[in-house]
Image (cartoon, coloured by chain):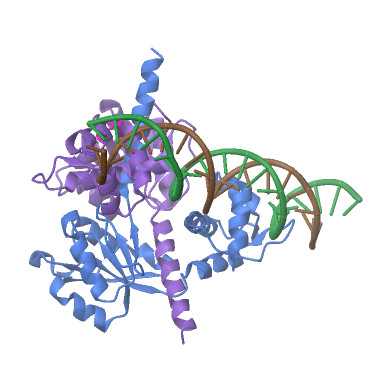
Chain colours: A blue, B purple, C green, D brown
Amino acid sequence: MKEISKSTLKRLPVYLSYLKGIPADGSAYISATALAAALDMGEVQVRKDLALVSSGGRPKVGYHRDSLISDIEAFLGYTNTNDALIVGAGKLGRALLGYSGFAEYGLNVLAAFDLNDALIGTSKSGKPIMHMSRLEEFCQANKVRIGIITVPAEYAQEACDRLIACGIKAIWNFAPKHLDVPSDILVQSENMAASLAVLSKHLSEQMEKNKEQL
Amino acid sequence: MKEISKSTLKRLPVYLSYLKGIPADGSAYISATALAAALDMGEVQVRKDLALVSSGGRPKVGYHRDSLISDIEAFLGYTNTNDALIVGAGKLGRALLGYSGFAEYGLNVLAAFDLNDALIGTSKSGKPIMHMSRLEEFCQANKVRIGIITVPAEYAQEACDRLIACGIKAIWNFAPKHLDVPSDILVQSENMAASLAVLSKHLSEQMEKNKEQL
DNA sequence: TAGATTGTTAATCGATTAACAATC
DNA sequence: TAGATTGTTAATCGATTAACAATC
C-alpha cells in the first residue's frame, strides 16, 4: 500500500461523515466529483484520496456508497474498537465522558479520573469517575490504549507520564501544553488556541479592511 | 508586512502559551533556539515565524520575553476582544460557555442559545442560556462577531445560516458537518474526527507491526 | 459511440530546511 | 576576538493541481 500523508488522513473522516449523512433513499453510488462539489474540495484531491483507501471506483459510476464507507472505516481502523480513559474530570472531561458519538469512530471511553474527591462517583452518563490513585490498577485490568488528557496545563505533563507508565500508546491532549513523550508514543493535540488564532486574525484583518475603505 | 501562512498562524499560539508559562524569575530573554528545543520544533522555523511578527530579536540575546508576548498577541488580534455566542447548549456547548480560559485569547463568550426549553435560564457559569427565538434580537443588541456552533450535525447548517443573517463574520464549528457559507465568512471547524483518525490509524499500524514481529 | 468518470503521470506551488552572511 | 544568535537567500521536499490516458 502507498504511503498516506497526514493531510489525506485528516480528510478521510470528512468524506466518511458526509457519506454517512447521505439519505439512504438516493443512489447507491457516488462519484468523487460529486463528493468534491458537496464539500468544496478539489475533485482530483478527493479522487486521489479515495484511490488510496478503496479500489471500488468504477468509471462513469463512481463508488458504491456503502462499500466506500466500509473501506474508509477499515483503513482508519474504526473496525477495531479502542478503549480509552480520560484524565481530568472537569467540565471538558465530563463532556467528553458523556459524549456518545465517539463509538462511531471506534473509540470507547471507559472512565474518567480526577484528584478531586468531590467528583468521584458516577457521572450522569453512567460512566464512572474514579480517583487518580486507581489509574494504574484500572489500566492493568482493562486494555486501555488511548489516554485523553483534560487537566489544566500545569498538570498535563505529569498526567501524560503516568499514562505512558501504564502502557498507553496514544494520547489525545486537550491541555494547551506541549507534551514530551518517547518516540513510539503518539500525541494528538486538540489545539483550540490555534483555531482561535485563525478566527481572531480573520476578524482583525477584516476590521483593517473596513478602515481602509473609509 | 509579509504574507503569513496558515501553518505559521497556527504555530504562533503554541509559542505564546509556552512563553506565558515560563516562570517570571528566570531570564527576561529567550532565544528562538531555546523555544525550538523546548517545543520539539525546527529552530529555523521558529526563528522565521517570530521574525514575521516581531522585530525585537537581538543577536546573542534573543527576544525580550514580555515584548515577544505582546507582539504575538497584537499580531493575532488578541488585544481587541471578540464577543461570541454559542448555538447549542448541550454538554459541549455548556462546557464551552463555562470555560473561563478563552479570555486569554480575546474571546468573550456572552451567552448560549438552544431550542430546548428545559435548558433555558442561567448556567452554572453565570452566563445566560437563551431560547433560539431571541438570537436575532440578542445579536442586534450586542456586537457579536463570532458564532460557536455546538448543535448536532443535522442542525448545523441551519444554525450557521441564522448566524450569518445576524451579521456574524466568523464561525467556530464543532459539529461534524461541512458548512456552506459566502466567501467573506470564515468557518473554522474543530475537527475531532480528524484527530481520532490520526490516533486510530497510529494504533492499528502499531498492531500490525506487532503482528509482523511474531 | 460519446461522455462521464476513474486513476496515473507530470508540472506547479508552497512550506520547510539548509546554508550563510550580519550583528552584538 | 570568538561565539551565539538573528535574519535572509537558496535548495529541498512534499502536497496539490493540471493534463491525460484508460475504462465502462
Work out whether B3 lies above or below C4.
above
Q: Quadrant of residue B144?
A: top left
Relative to the observer, which residue lies in front, A129 or A152? Answer: A152
Quadrant into which the N terminus of chain B falls = top left
Work out whether B165 lies above or below A9.
above
Q: Quadrant of residue B159?
A: top left
x%, y% of residue C2? Answer: 86, 46
**Residue A212 within the segment the image draws in magenta:** no
Residue shown at 30% from the left, 34% from the top: B76
x%, y% of residue B114? Answer: 30, 45
The magenta segment: B73-77
Relative to the observer, which residue lies in front, A120 or A176? Answer: A176
**Residue B75 within the segment the image draws in magenta:** yes
Whether residue A24 appears in this view of the structure is yes
Residue reaching furthest to the top: A214
Residue shown at 26% from the left, 26% from the top: B141
